[in-house]
Amino acid sequence: MHSTDLQTVDDYHTLWQTSNHINWTIQDLIGGDKRLNFTRPFLPDALARVSTISCLNQQEKLKLNQIRGNSYLYLFGLCEEFILPSVIEYVSHIQRNDLYAIQAYLHFAEEESKHILLFRQFAKEFEQGFGIPCECIGPAQAICDRILAYHPLAVALMTLHIEWMTQRHYLESVRDNQGLDPQFCRLLRYHWLEEAQHAKLGALMVQEVARGLAPAAIEAAIADYFSIIDLLDQGLQQQVQLDLESLSRATNRQFSTTEQVEIQANQLQSYRWTFLWSGMTHQNVRRTFVEICPSSKARLLEKAKALG
């Protein structure tokens, strides 16, 4: 791997310092008297999109919103489970004199592992408070292994997608939203603060990995990125069905075929917008794709349109 230039070294130093400044612990955010409020929604409707489902009453919509809040953090945790080993592997290739880069990415990895543990703790508190188990896709390790089998540049691009997606969700939909459970919003806020640094590191990682590849190899890696998108889309389709089953148990209601079709169509569009479209169309993701492979822009937009 090439040695970083002086400006990039300065960037790594700044990002590392900022991450240390905003550092928090799991105990700061969850446990004790820091409890979820199950009388309020967890996700903004821009992400959960339950308000337009005509076959559900308001209480059922609230239940589905909370089920979506649970799966939202589970899916973030799942993604971070493949990001973590990919970042550690990347660190092993950094030249030993790039000490600020090493510090920055090791801190990146440490924070990702902390997020995984935070979301696992959330899952326990959610199940206890919600009253019924809500299944999520998995096993997570098997999904992560499939993603990590793709080209490292594809995994880095997917990581960048997720980091900028996180920024978009929080800034556009969660921040300043007064109608949501404050505890859930607090978890998202502190997650967002650290992911803001990860997004910048992710962009540097993509640039560095791409720098050592021939154009044909970059194109192949971008094709792998789209394969990861398809893999995640399959998982989202499965999650929609699991959520429907959880909603049926939570409401003690058997939905008719017509009602199931309405809920599934609505929620698949919502999941795709939340986890795929909102990352693929982020201006900083598009910019990175164009920088490493100008011809990829059209395909990125075409795929996003198909999922939007």
Image: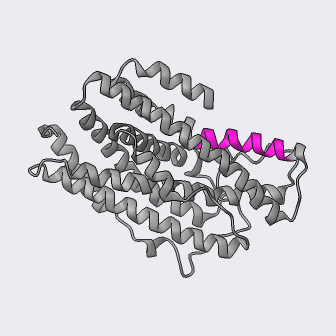
**Along the line of sight, which residue is nearer the eye, 252 or 23?**
252
> Left or right of 227: which side holds 202?
left
> Taking the image as drawn, is residue 255 in sight?
yes
Q: Is residue 305 above or below residue 189?
A: above
| Image coordinates for residue 50, horizontal then vertical, percent | 75, 48
**Along the line of sight, which residue is nearer the eye, 269 or 141?**
141
| Image coordinates for residue 260, horizontal then vertical, percent | 83, 47
Name the magenta segment's main secondary structure.
helix
> Left or right of 83: which side holds 264?
right
Residue that protrudes farthest toward the bottom in the picture: 32
Residue at (17% x, 44% y) in the render? 10
Report the label total: 0
> Taking the image as drawn, is residue 308 in sight?
no
> Left or right of 202: which side holds 125?
right
Q: Is residue 169 above or below residue 181?
A: above
**Along the line of sight, which residue is nearer the eye, 106 or 29?**
106
Q: Quadrant of the N terminus?
A: top left
Residue at (30% x, 45% y) in the render? 201
Q: Residue 41, located in which quarter of the rendered image?
A: bottom right
Q: Is residue 24 above or below residue 270?
A: below
| Image coordinates for residue 200, horizontal then vertical, percent | 33, 43
Residue at (56% x, 69% y) in the render? 122
| Residue 73 counted in the magenta span | no
Residue at (51% x, 42% y) in the render? 168
Q: Residue 164, located in which quarter of the rendered image?
A: top left
Q: Which residues are magenta?
A: 260-274
